[in-house]
Image (cartoon, rainbow, N blue to C red):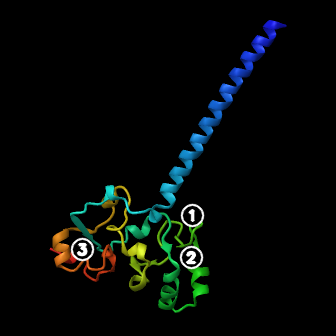
Amino acid sequence: MESLEKSGGHFKARFKVTMIRSLSQYLLSSHITLLIRSILNTNRDIKPLATYRDPETWYQCDRCTACCKWPGDVRVEDDEVARIAEFLGVDEDDFIQKFTRLRMNRNGLSLIERENHECIMLENDLCKIQDVKPFQCKGFPNRWNFPDWQKVCKAKPVPMVEAMELGLVDEGDLSANHPLRGRDLK
């Protein structure tokens, strides 16, 4: 009987260790899966990352639309809804119903993206709300970007001093808001 209890105790201990390992692997796997989904699905919702930005260089948007085709949230802040709706000639409720969805973090609205990840506002490689596009869009690639963005984006690098002299930085990190395109620079 004593040997049975010892072996039963050993079995219980091994069972607990096995269960803890399995649970740990499951939780780690779930955490990694969530992290990967977060990276793939919310890249437009990331905060500025200094590691991707060279403070000595300004990148002037060329409107190549690479950032408009990247998957993830395109935040539309409350104060932007009315301006965009008016520009499109629709009332705010219609704009919200037709062109937005809840952000992945459930903390506000995002523009809808098509199945191929293009922004709903992209038509024939032009932004149909260019003049009133969300602040997030105006800030790419200087205010926010993603790893290896330079492999897909055609924004032209300009030394920061020259960019300031040209008036490109007057509006802060809003390179896509300036009428001068990267291709117009020497």
Give the number of the mark in front: 3 or 1. 1
Callout 1 crowding tier (Cα within 10 Å): few <14, some 14–19, many ≥20 = some
The one nearer the camera, 119 or 107, is: 107
| Alpha carbons under labels 2 and 3: distance apart | 30 Å
Residue 67 in the image: state x and y as whole percent.
Answer: 39, 68
Q: Residue at x 38, y 63 (%)?
A: 48
Q: Which residue appears at 28% of the width and 83% of the height?
A: 179
Q: Amino acid at mark 1?
A: Met
Which residue is identified by label 2?
100
In the picture, measured across the screen, residue 12 lies left or right of residue 68, that is right
Q: Are marks 1 and 2 in contact (CB under 8 Å)?
A: no
Q: How far apart are labels 1 and 2 at the CA level?
A: 12 Å
| Mark 3 crowd level (few <14, some 14–19, many ≥20, 10 Å Cα) | many
- The CA span between labels 3 and 1 is 32 Å
Residue 63 image position (x, y, % from top left)? 33, 75
Q: Secondary structure at mark 2?
A: strand
**Position in image of residue 144 (x %, y %):** 37, 65
Q: Secondary structure at mark 1?
A: loop
**Residue carrying label 3:** 182
The image quadrant of residue 176 is bottom left
Judging by the rendered image, the residue that carries numbered circle 1 is 104
Quarter of the rendering occupied by the N terminus: top right
In front of the other: 105 or 36 = 105
Q: Residue at x 57, y 84 (%)?
A: 95
Q: Amino acid at mark 2?
A: Thr
Quarter of the rendering occupied by the C terminus: bottom left
Q: Answer with mark 2 or mark 3, whichever residue precedes in sequence.
A: 2
Q: Residue furthest right?
A: 1
Q: Are marks 3 and 1 in contact (CB under 8 Å)?
A: no
On screen, 164 above or below 54?
A: below
**Mark closest to the chain's N terminus, 3 or 1:** 1
- Residue at x 47% of width, y 69% of height: 118
